[in-house]
Amino acid sequence: MSGRPNLSPRAQKTALLGMLGGVALALSFLESLIPGMPGLPPGAKPGFSNIAVMAAAAHLGLPGSLCIMLLKAGYALLSRGASAGFMSLSGGVLSMAVMLLLLRGRRNPFGAVGAGILCALAHNLGQLLAAWALTGTSAILGYAPLLMLFALLTGIATGAVYGAVSPYCNRIFPSLPK
């Protein structure tokens, strides 16, 4: 006997969803403590909480990743207001779509770091489009080059962390369908 309870796949998915939700909220809160970075738009953060969405996309598919992404957007809405909630949702939807395409499939040609970069780029694109919609001015797109560089750097970090923790998720929840 291994000492582990014999949980059904549904119970395992529920447990993983709860843990990833807690991680996403904790990382979102910690990111909110980071002061604004010079030269970046207000509210630009590293996006470490997206690691939880990446894990949900890989291990739980659309329903799980959607729950975590909506939880993050809801937290932004409640803690920073409607604009932040809309920005989080807009970036989250595009980023999650990229995650599902790359991480849920059998083969990810870009690896964890490449997926992290592409997801960060998609997230920033979604947020730029949301900011454009909110402000009504295309001048906001002037932030695009700086945000793309920021996405490259933060995507490397989030992808590397996701790549490091993903094998542990596989070991903890071995019976979940991949």
Image (cartoon, rainbow, N blue to C red):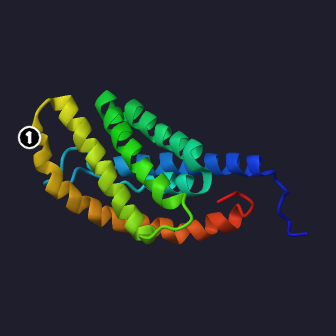
Determine which quarter of the picture holds residue 64: top right
**Position of residue 96 in the picture relative to residue 81 (left or right):** right
Q: How many numbered discs? A: 1
Quadrant where the C terminus is found in the figure: bottom right
Image point (63%, 63%), residue name: 169
- Amino acid type assigned to the residue bearing label 1 in the image: Ala
**Position of residue 127 in the picture relative to residue 13 (left or right):** left
**Position of residue 123 in the picture relative to residue 139 (left or right):** right
- In front here: 37 or 116? 116
Image point (26%, 36%), residue name: 130
- Return the x and y of residue 101 as percentages of the image width and height: 47, 55
Q: Is residue 38 visible?
A: no
Q: Classify 56 as above or below 164.
A: above
Q: Is residue 7 visible?
A: yes
Classed neighbour count for the residue bearing mark 1: other residues with Cα under 10 Å, few (<14), some (14–19), many (≥20) = few
Quadrant where the N terminus is found in the figure: bottom right
- Return the x and y of residue 86 as percentages of the image width and height: 33, 33
**Position of residue 3 in the picture relative to residue 14 (left or right):** right
- Return the x and y of residue 82 as percentages of the image width and height: 33, 28
Give the farthest residue toward the right.
1
Q: Classify 16 as above or below 175.
A: above
Q: Classify 127 as above or below 174.
A: above
SS for callout 1: helix
Image point (84%, 57%), residue name: 5
Q: Which residue is mark 1?
A: 139
